[in-house]
Image: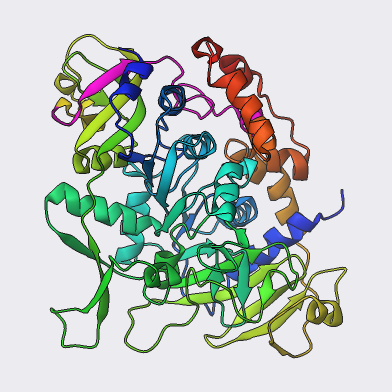
Amino acid sequence: MTVSREEMLIGAIARLILDPAAPPARHIAVGAASPIPAAACWLVKLMGHPVRLSLLHRPTGNPFTEGTRELFDLAGQGRIDLFFLGGGQIDGQANLNLVGTGAWPGRAARFPGSFGSAFMYLMTPRTILFREEHSRRVLVPRVDIVSAPGISPPGVFRRGTAQALVTGRCVFRFDGAGFTLASIHPGDTAQSVRENTGFDYAEADAPPTPAPTQAQLDLLRGPVCDEMMETYPEFCRRVWRRATDISDNAGKAA
Amino acid sequence: MTSDDLAALVPDGALLALPPDNSLAPCEFARALVRRGARGLRLLGVPVSGFATDLLIGAGCVASVQTSAVTLGEAGTAPRFTDAVRRGAIEVIDATCPAIHTMLQAAEKGVPFMPLRGVLGSDVAAHRPDWKTIDNPFAAGGDPILLLPALSPDIAAFHAVCADSHGNVWVGRRRECATIAHASRRTLVTVERMVAGNLLDDERMAPGVISGVYVEAVAVTARGAWPIGLLDEYAMDGPHIAEYARLARTEEGFASYLARHVLPPSAVAA
C-alpha cells in the first residue's frame, strides 16, 4: 500500500505538533469535521508522547460534561495548548475567513460561520492551520471577511497565533508577520505552489515533505484508524478501506 | 402531550434557542413546528446550528438566525440556510461560539453583561453593535476587552433521554443544555420516555438533571432526535442526512423531502 495523500498530510501535521521549537502541546483539542488533524493527534499520542486529546465531537467518552462551553472556558484559562483551524479563505497575514465571500455576511458565497475561531485563535498558544484545497480561491491576498485575525495590535490579549499552514500542496511556516514555504509535498514544485497561492510569501529552498515512517504508517492503518472509526467512519472507509458496520444505526433509524 | 402540542406553545416570532446536532437536537419538535406552520421564528444556535435549523429555514418558519455556524457536519454545508443567505431571505446575526455561551451565562446569573476574551479584531465583533469593547477597569490601562449583553431566549427546546413526573429532565453529560434552560424564559422538552420516581433522588443521575423548576412542558417522543443521534441511545442516521443534504440543494427537492418526512405526522421514523 503506497503512502496516500491523507497520510502525507497527517505525517506533516504530526511533525509540526512535535516541533521542539514550538510551545509545548500537553493538551490538544480537535473540533468538528477535522479527521486529518485528529489522526495526526492520535498518531502523536500512540507514538508514546504524553499528550491529552480532547476530541470535541467524540460521541463515546466525550471529554466534556458541559459541552463546548467547557472547551472555551478551558481555552480562556490557557488550558488548551494547541488547536486546529481552517478557513474558506486564508490570507498572507494568517487571517481566517469562515463566514463567507462578498458583502457581509457572505452574500456571494456563504460558509458555515466562524464557529469558535474568533476566540480560540487568540486564546491558544499555538494554532495549526489546515486547509486541503490549495488554490488562489482559498489562499487569497486579503480575506473578504475576517472571522479571526492572525495578527493583533499591541495591547490586545493574545497567547499565540498560527504556527504553520498545512495544505494539500505544502507546509508554510508563520512567523507572526508572514508565511515562509517550509516543505513541498510530492507531486508539487516551488513553481506550482507559487502559481496556486494568492498571497505573497517568503521562499528559500524548501525540501520535500517527508513521508511518514513505516512505523507511523503501521500505527495509522491500525490503532489510529481504530480510534477514529466512531467519529469519522466515512474517512476511515475512504482512506484505510476499513469496513464499517452501519446496520445497527440504519436498523434503529428505519 | 405530543411534540405537536409542544409546538403549539411556540408563538410566531419567538426567540427559540436550539442546541447543535451533537447535543440533544429536538428534530421531531422542529418537524412539529413545520407542521404547525410557525412563522417569523428567531432562532438561536447554542452555539452552532444544524439539521433542525436548516429544516425550519427551508420550510419558511424563520425570520432570523443568530449562530456561530450552520452545518450538517460530515454531510457538508446546510443547503437551505446557504440559499436563504444568498437570497437575503433571512437575517443572519453572526456570533462566535463562546460569545453565545457567555451571553446565556449572563442571563443565567441575572447580570446585564459579561466580558469575554478574544474576538477583538474579528469582523464578527465589528458587525455586532450590541457588543461593546471597554478598557479592563481592573488593569492599569491598555487592556481592551469585549462586553456581551445578557441574552434570554423566549423558549429553549431540546430532546433528552428521559424525564420524571416532576418535570425533571435528564440530559446526561450535555449539561450545557442546563445553561440554555436556565437562561430561557420557557423550556420545552421532548424525551424518549418517562421514568418512575424522582430523578433528583438518584445520586448518580442527579448531576445530569435539569430541575423541573425550569421546565414548562415535556412530551414523550420516541426517536425525537432522529435523524440526529442521541447520547448512547442511538447513532446519527448518516445516510438519511446525506439524502437530506442532496434533496435540499433545490427548493423542489426540499419540498419533496418535507412531503415525505415531515408533513404527514405518520411519516416520522417509527
Q: Is residue B146 visible?
A: yes
Front residue of A161/B267: it is: B267
Residue at horizontal 49%, vertical 63%? Answer: A83
Quarter of the image that includes the N terminus of chain B: top left
Residue at horizontal 51%, vertical 69%? Answer: A127
Front residue of A137/A35: it is: A137
Residue B58 percent across, percent down from the top left = 54, 37
Q: Tell me if residue B156 comes above or below residue A171 in the rendering.
A: above
Residue A164 percent across, percent down from the top left = 60, 75
Q: Is residue A81 visible?
A: no
Residue B4: which quarter of the image?
Answer: top left
Residue at horizontal 76%, vertical 42%? Answer: A238
Q: Tell me if residue B268 comes above or below residue A3 in the rendering.
A: above
A82 relative position to A107: left or right = left
Residue at horizontal 75%, vertical 70%? Answer: A135
Residue A195: which quarter of the image?
Answer: bottom right
Residue bounds of the magenta highlight: B213-242
For the stretch drawn in magenta, what is the main secondary structure? loop
Q: Tell me if residue A12 comes above or below residue B174 in the rendering.
A: below
Residue A44: which quarter of the image?
Answer: bottom right
Residue A111 percent across, percent down from the top left = 58, 57
Total labels drawn: 0
B197 relative position to A24: left or right = left
Residue A201 percent across, percent down from the top left = 68, 87
